[in-house]
């Protein structure tokens, strides 16, 4: 038995995406920059993927830039936008709970002389919109905030924050790291006033190493890499056509089945929450109103790594905090004001469109067994 519950780290590629990627490799293998027919066929695949992303974001497909994933998109967005506005201000506002691809990029700017203000969640783990309004001032060039936190599923208050800030500071550049929220929550960048929006394919049933960046029409972003001018010189280098074609197919599949996919996340989340109530020692860390594909919980006293491997022996795959910060005590969970003991024992479960009720029952059974055994060991 294998139960994969680490879909925030990455998802299984859907059959539609596999087929599209295979076809791009075997048949449409031209270079999209080539002027002949084979080039044109490959170029059409890129356009198809731009259109699939644009259809989900309600924007023109010319605003979609194809990248090597969200780390790439976040770097281009943040560094590129700030560079283009170098003379207009020296402050960047972000949060204390960002993914390293945002947090480290902003820290690099700080080392280069920018002032960085990091908005923190309140003690209840929720962000207050007014804290963002207070942090941004006339010197702020960029606000970069995530849509949904990847460890807890907390939804950030971008819907309130962005329009309010844009009203007060029309020139402020707003970047949203949308990796964990894209297609899960309704999101229309133009309507909200968002200038830059990053997403990743492999969290949405597409192959790894491909993603996208929405750039508002007219916004100037300077390149952070130089090369052959692909993606309007914002992301140069020959495009990963098979992965991009796969992402187009995956996005189309998600768009078509969105309601059913969301329903499955909600049902599995509710089911697991109920089952955890009956397992001694379980404490839920995710908020009630979070994005339902993630459920984070702890068994205080049993270290995450120990639990993770005990579950792995039973064929169950979960994550201890973010897969990007292997082994380290999660700074993000601490930033959400979780007590150290809960941080040390946190497990993140993330559902896929295919996760079944039977799998969650079996997972709960495995948890019951493992925690019963481990707490006997830990408590002597
Ligand atoms: N931002 C968030 C919120 C994420 O969860 C991740 C993936 N863990 C990334 C950015 C990075 O995405 P990618 O793996 O496509 O570089």
Image: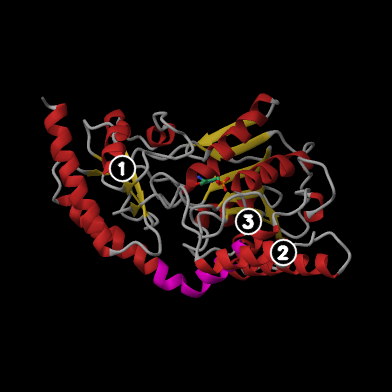
Q: Residue furthest right?
A: 35
Which of the two marks, 1 or 3, is nearer to us in this view?
A: 1
What residue sits right under mark 2 in the picture? Answer: 46
Q: Nearer the viewer, mark 3 or mark 2?
A: 2
Name the residue that disc number 3 marks.
194
Picture coordinates of residue 259, whole percent (x, y) = 42, 72
Whichever of labels 1 and 3 marks the residue nearer the N terminus, that label is 3
Please tell me which of labels 3 and 2 falls first in the chain: 2
Residue 219 position, x and y percent, is: 76, 53
Callout 2 secondary element: helix
Q: Percent x, y for residue 89? A: 73, 36
User: Could you say whether the residue bearing mark 1 is in a helix, strand or loop?
Assistant: helix
For marks 1 and 2 on the same chain, the one whose residue lies earlier in the sequence? 2
Of residues 351 and 359, the one nearer the viewer is 359
Dot 2 surroundings within 10 Å: few (below 14), some, or many (20 or more)?
A: many
Query: Gap in Å between the C-alphas at discs 1 and 2?
Result: 38 Å
Location of residue 70 in the rendering, given as x and y in whole percent from the top left corner: 60, 48
Asked whether, in this view, residue 16 is left or right of residue 50, the answer is: left
The mark found on residue 137 in the picture is: none
The magenta segment is: 246-261
Q: How many numbered marks are there? A: 3
Q: Residue at x 81, y 50 (%)?
A: 233
């Amino acid at each position: 038995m294998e139960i994969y519950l680490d879909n925030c780290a990455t998802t299984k590629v859907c059959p539609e995406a596999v087929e599209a990627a295979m076809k791009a490799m075997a048949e449409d293998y031209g270079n999209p920059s080539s002027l002949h027919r084979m080039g044109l066929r490959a170029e059409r695949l890129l356009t198809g993927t731009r259109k699939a992303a644009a259809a989900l974001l309600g924007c023109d497909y010319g605003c979609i830039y194809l990248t090597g994933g969200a780390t790439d998109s976040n770097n281009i967005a943040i560094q590129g936008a700030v560079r283009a506005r170098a003379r207009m201000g020296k402050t960047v506002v972000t949060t204390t709970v960002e993914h390293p691809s945002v947090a480290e990029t902003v820290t690099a700017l700080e080392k280069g002389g920018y002032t960085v203000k990091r908005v923190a969640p309140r003690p209840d783990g929720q962000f207050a919109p007014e804290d963002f309004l207070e942090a941004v001032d006339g010197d702020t060039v960029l606000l970069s905030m995530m849509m949904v936190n990847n460890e807890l599923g907390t939804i950030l208050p971008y819907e309130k924050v962005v329009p309010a800030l844009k009203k007060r500071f029309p020139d402020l550049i707003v970047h949203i790291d949308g990796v964990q929220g894209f297609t899960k929550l309704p999101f229309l960048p133009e309507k909200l006033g968002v200038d830059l929006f990053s997403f990743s394919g492999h969290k949405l049933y597409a192959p790894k190493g491909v993603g996208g960046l929405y750039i508002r029409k007219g916004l100037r972003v300077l390149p952070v890499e130089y090369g052959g001018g692909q993606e309007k010189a914002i992301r140069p280098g020959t495009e990963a056509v098979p992965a991009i074609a796969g992402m187009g197919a995956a996005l189309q599949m998600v768009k078509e089945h969105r309601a059913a996919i969301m329903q499955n996340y909600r049902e599995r989340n509710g089911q697991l929450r109920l089952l955890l109530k009956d397992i001694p020692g379980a404490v839920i860390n995710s908020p009630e109103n979070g994005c339902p594909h993630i459920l984070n919980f702890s068994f205080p006293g049993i270290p995450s790594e120990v639990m993770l491997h005990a579950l792995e022996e039973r064929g169950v795959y979960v994550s201890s905090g973010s897969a990007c910060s292997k082994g380290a005590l999660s700074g993000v969970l601490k930033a959400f004001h979780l007590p150290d003991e809960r941080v040390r024992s946190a497990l993140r479960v993330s559902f896929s469109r295919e996760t079944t009720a039977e799998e969650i029952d079996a997972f709960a059974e495995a948890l019951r067994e493992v925690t019963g055994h481990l707490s006997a060991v830990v408590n002597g």
